[in-house]
Image: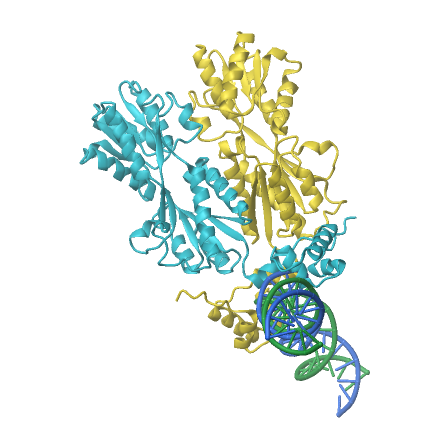
Chain colours: A yellow, B cyan, C green, D blue
Amino acid sequence: MSETAPRPTLEAVAARAGVSRATVSRVVNGSDGVREPLAERVRRAVDELGYVPNQAARSLVTRRHDAVAVIVAEPETRVFADPFFARQLRGISKELTAHDNQLVLLLTEDRDDHARVARYLAGGHVDGALVFSLHVDDPLPGLIQRAGLPTVFGGRPHWNGGEDGVRYVDTDNRGGARDAVRHLLALGRRRIAHITGALDQTSAVDRLDGFRDVMADPDPALVEEGDFTAASGERAMRALLTRRADLDAVFAGNDLMAAGALRALRDHGRRVPEDVAVVGFDDMLPIAEQTEPPLTTVRQDIEEMGRLMARLLLRDLDRGAEPDQAGDPAASGVVLPVTLVRRASA
Amino acid sequence: MSETAPRPTLEAVAARAGVSRATVSRVVNGSDGVREPLAERVRRAVDELGYVPNQAARSLVTRRHDAVAVIVAEPETRVFADPFFARQLRGISKELTAHDNQLVLLLTEDRDDHARVARYLAGGHVDGALVFSLHVDDPLPGLIQRAGLPTVFGGRPHWNGGEDGVRYVDTDNRGGARDAVRHLLALGRRRIAHITGALDQTSAVDRLDGFRDVMADPDPALVEEGDFTAASGERAMRALLTRRADLDAVFAGNDLMAAGALRALRDHGRRVPEDVAVVGFDDMLPIAEQTEPPLTTVRQDIEEMGRLMARLLLRDLDRGAEPDQAGDPAASGVVLPVTLVRRASA
DNA sequence: CCCGGCGGCGAGAGCGCTCTCGCCGCGGCG
DNA sequence: CGCCGCGGCGAGAGCGCTCTCGCCGCCGGG
């Protein structure tokens, strides 16, 4: 009973149906050229025996694996502090399974892991890779490019100026930041501060750029660097308040920092939004709804981002490995729109 | 240049080193029986050619895949609302990669997915499975058991009464609940309420049981069912306050509900902890630290839980598929300890 | 000096599949 | 009525690896 049943092979199915292996293979893989009565007999044999193709054997000859690696290079910071990651993964998963592809997850922490990942990718276990690497000095993207696998990045990669044709999906960080700041202006605020995220990440840089787009030459005293954590937001807010006690609005680089900023404002006796209006970024739930007051923020569709990354990659895989360098212009980088969500804080 | 380099095979390495395939295989797989000068020559050939074994070919004959499926059956609810999932995954990932195993992630949403997962597992792509399924009516655990793969569950599965020898790792929900309630008693509180989680999940049931262990026959009016969301915590707290305006403490089934309860208490003008002491569960960061006041709560080591699940599974895999029914008694279920974290709310 | 044993290495089969060929039978056209 | 063409199916090679054998050479003992 506990004996692992010897899985039936193509051969066995062929024998039972009284046909050749080739014919069974044709039926199983849905290629035409098998006439109906025969095909039906094969199908019956397949599920009488409970036949399931051996993927290893198949991969050995087709050189396809129907599997995609998802590489996340983000040990300590935001990815694990918030539900971002899970959402993205979910989007990716949906798209991949819809196309019968598996998701192999690789989490990396340090340099040793990089070598491991590189080896894994070179090992040809997967047909492509989706990569999340947010930091500027990360050697991972380079390693991966070198492995020669079709790849799509999550978030605009850093060295984008140089290498071209790098596929990525990003949210409209810059545009979202502009929307946020314009909203504050529309409320009549004029002394608007910005708490940046960790500036070694493109998302933080892009949001800062958006802020500058609208504020055109802001007082440097109104910009303070954070690192996307709530604690950094609180600290930054305090610093801003001592430098510019007259500020009347803050655009924080993400909701976590906005939450930190709210505490600092409360401690300093500032009312939100009456004295100081606050806008966040991400619409990270449940944080954004739970703050006091609830956050006005810029929402990005995280799950859609994941889905899109997967879709892009699968498309590449379908039309053969060659990314078709002449290919469609829209393909190299895709930027998803964002929307401003108005709650009580601004 | 864009030509995908034909990966070198064992054959090629053998030719270059002037030995047979068997010898190269021996060296690559670290089995002894190859004398030093020869072994060295092989090793040189391997990295001159950049040889990486073809996993598909290897699996075909060894019937091992060095891959483990992680199945998460939790679309909407807590897993995606909080960083739980990511933490657990990280623990799992660490342990798996330490043993050169890959992590194949399967997220399921609905019944169709179940069939897909069952097929995948039956397809023999992976050597074992780690399963997270929290709901009582989930058919998934049954399907998986039937696939005959070595499996470890995250959280005590539901039908535990029946089937025996089911491997799982759980946190000490009941003991943690007892600690929480005893802490409230030690503070002198006597009219202690409990907001339960969704009672179709064992964790919620166990926490309720722990509450009852200590309170022995509590007033039913002091127990209100929630569903682990902040909104449900808020609603439950309101209900409790109208029923028993004299309550002086609340033990919430998780931190999210505790956060909801805090708002309800604030709205009703109750001071925390002076009028009502509040204890949560999970120590979910950053929520638990960000509430006003910060939450006293029961901490569980999520990452360790993941690591342990992986370790258990790998152990099973190592000693052949047979779980050794006589095996060590500790193996069927492992319960991880929790610790009470004191902050300002109680 | 011969023989037995043992350890190091090579030959070869085979894992379960895909895919190219080529064969065979049937239908249509000359 | 014969021939050619084509579509349906089977035979067989081969994907890259592991692992069992068995061979061969070396060493020690009789």
Give above or below for B257 relative to A321. Answer: above
Give above or below for B80 relative to B157. Answer: above
Residue B53 drawn at (x, y percent): 65, 55
Displayed quadrant of residue B195: top left
Residue drawn at (35%, 32%) of the image: B339
Quarter occupied by the C terminus of chain B: top left
Q: Nearer the viewer, residue A190 or A283?
A: A283
Residue A184 drawn at (x, y percent): 55, 17
Residue drawn at (32%, 52%) of the image: B159
State whether residue B117 appears in this view: no
| Left/right of residue B321 with respect to residue A28 in the rendered view | left
| Left/right of residue B57 with respect to residue B198 in the rendered view | right
Displayed quadrant of residue C8: bottom right
State whether residue A40 appears in this view: yes
Residue drawn at (46%, 59%) of the image: B320
| Left/right of residue A68 with respect to residue B172 in the rendered view | right
Residue B127 drawn at (x, y percent): 50, 56
Q: Nearer the viewer, residue B253 or A317?
A: B253
| Left/right of residue B9 with respect to residue B220 in the rendered view | right
Q: Nearer the viewer, residue B192 or B322?
A: B322
